Image (cartoon, rainbow, N blue to C red):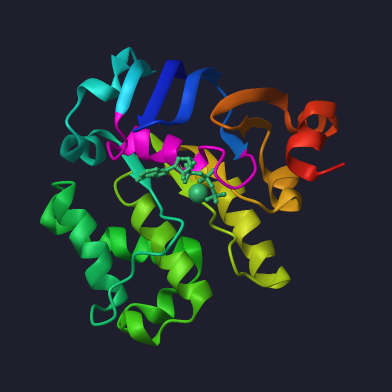
């Protein structure tokens, strides 16, 4: 279970997260809200890139915020970025090797991990492809493959569906839905695509101006009047 307790983040005078309290038990949870609502700020708070004003994020009886940012990946936190972080002159497998080294995974298991995550996301044929030669879908899949290395406890995906076609989205849906079974990780997913959120997230949290305005089963949350007004515009 992930317990977010009274979490606030301020950027100068901007309150990006305002006393957020949320307990997450589901395997896949959505995080939605209008532009600037604080979604990326929340993923940054988990990974150690946001100025925390107050609060805790407790997972497995440990306050993640007490762990230095550089130790969080090794502990079991993985994230993808809204803007993909792919290096043009590194091959796909080099991106994965960097994660394997950062997590201190046994060198003898390197090939096993690369095979496993590339097979899972369906881009085994891209192992030697340079970042610059990947299309946007394959960049997204490489980002997700990086997240899966080493069976993390929690994966945060920031707009994994951005810029994908409908058939690519279908593939993304099955990857997200199968992650818990194959890799054991809980997923918190930020996305603007309501169809994707509805299809894969058991529960969804809605932020507006840094405040939690709804949380619960996704179908109920999407019918909530306050959510419709804040996010869906009707
Ligand atoms: N590094 C930063 N410095 C100053 N202000 C920031 C910083 N990062 C975010 N903010 C502000 O915090 C608020 C929340 O931003 P955030 O990026 O978390 O929103 P978001 O919900 O991810 O939006 P989007 O859907 O556009 O990605 C915004 O007002 C934003 O301008
Ligand atoms: Mg964002």
Image quadrant for the C terminus? top right
Looking at the image, which is closer to me, 94 or 191?
191
Q: Residue 74, how many percent across, how many down? A: 21, 39
The quarter holding residue 224 reads top right
In this view, 121 is above or below 222? below
Residue located 54% across and 44% down the image? 36
Residue 65 horizontal side relative to residue 133, left or right: left
Q: Residue 8, how many percent across, how many down? A: 41, 22
In this view, 217 is above or below 229? above
Residue 205 horizontal side relative to residue 188, left or right: right
Number of numbered callouts drawn: 0
The quarter holding residue 214 reads top right
Q: Residue 149, how many percent across, how many down? A: 32, 52
Question: From where the camera sits, is residue 74 visible?
Answer: yes
Residue located 50% across and 20% down the image? 20
Residue located 49% across and 22% down the image? 18
Residue span colored magenta: 32-51
Residue 182 horizontal side relative to residue 213, left or right: left
Residue located 63% across and 64% down the image? 171
Looking at the image, which is closer to me, 13 or 60?
13
């Amino acid at each position: 279970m992930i317990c977010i307790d009274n979490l606030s983040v301020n950027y100068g005078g901007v309150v990006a997260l305002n006393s957020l309290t949320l307990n997450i038990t589901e395997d896949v949870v959505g995080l939605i809200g209008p532009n600037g609502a604080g979604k990326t700020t929340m993923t940054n708070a988990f990974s150690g890139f946001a100025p925390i004003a107050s609060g805790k994020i407790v997972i497995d009886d440990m306050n993640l915020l007490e762990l230095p940012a550089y130790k969080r990946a090794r502990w079991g936190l993985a994230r993808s970025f809204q803007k993909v972080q792919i290096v043009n002159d590194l091959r796909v497998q080099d991106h994965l090797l960097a994660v394997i080294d950062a997590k201190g995974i046994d060198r003898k298991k390197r090939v096993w991990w690369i095979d496993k995550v590339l097979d899972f996301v369906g881009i085994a044929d891209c192992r030697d492809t340079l970042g610059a030669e990947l299309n946007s879908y394959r960049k997204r899949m490489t980002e997700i493959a990086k997240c899966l290395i080493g069976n993390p406890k929690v994966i945060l995906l920031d707009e994994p569906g951005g810029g994908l076609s409908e058939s690519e989205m279908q593939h993304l849906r099955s990857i997200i839905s199968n992650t818990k079974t194959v890799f054991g990780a809980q997923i918190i997913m930020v996305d603007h695509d309501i169809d994707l959120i509805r299809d894969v997230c058991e529960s969804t949290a809605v932020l507006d101006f840094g405040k939690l305005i709804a949380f619960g089963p996704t179908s109920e949350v999407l019918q909530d009047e306050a959510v419709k007004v804040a996010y869906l515009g009707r």
